[in-house]
Image (cartoon, rainbow, N blue to C red):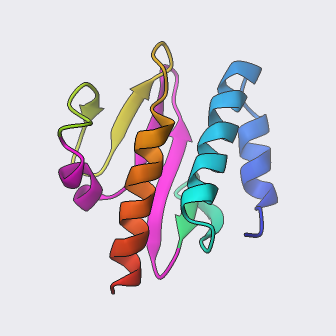
Amino acid sequence: MIQSQEITDYIHSYPTEIQDILMKTRATIQAAAPDSYEKMSYQMPTYYLNGNLVHFAAAKKHLGFYPTPSAISKFATELSAYKTSKGAVQFPYNQDIPYELIAKMVAFRVKENLAK
């Protein structure tokens, strides 16, 4: 995977404690979708593999993760402790970020996109 300098710059624009979360999120996505490529889209780090895969973004009090409505539905039980919308989930910074769950959602999205 070619790392986007734009995404590196985006991560480095945040305070150190947020940078750590963003870097770990980036690494989690890259490990779960090694054939994807990354770029900025909608002013968020975005991953593509046979179409849009996932986005993530830093907000004031949470990590926004955007795995599409299908992944939100598929993982509804695991996501029940978090605020979700049709295609997004908020992981509060004051709780442990569920990187394993993020990896599972990314892997689900990879399978979904490769089946297109």
* Residue 55, magenta (yes or no): yes
Residue 45: tell me if it is visible.
no
Question: Could you say where residue 25 lies in the image, as x and y percent from the top left?
Answer: 59, 42
- Frontmost residue, 30 versus 15: 30
Q: Nearer the viewer, residue 4 or 42?
A: 4
Check the image and report above or below for 18 versus 4.
above
The correct choice, above or below, for 84 with respect to 44 in the image is above
Q: Residue at x 40, y 42 (%)?
A: 101
User: Does any portion of residue 99 appear in the rendered image?
Assistant: yes
Q: Provide residue 92's location: percent of width, then percent of height.
A: 43, 21
Give the x, y percent position of residue 9. 79, 46
Q: Is residue 53 above or below residue 58?
A: below
In the displayed orientation, state which residue is furthest to the bottom. 116
How many callouts does the rendering have? 0
Front residue of 29/55: it is: 29
Membership of 1 in magenta stretch: no
Residue most extreme to the top: 94
Say which residue appears at 52% left-offset and 57% top-offset: 42
Q: Position of residue 30 (x, y in %)?
A: 63, 58
Q: Where the C terminus falls, by quadrant?
A: bottom left
First to last magenta residue range: 49-76
47 left or right of 20 in image: left
Q: Quadrant of the N terminus?
A: bottom right
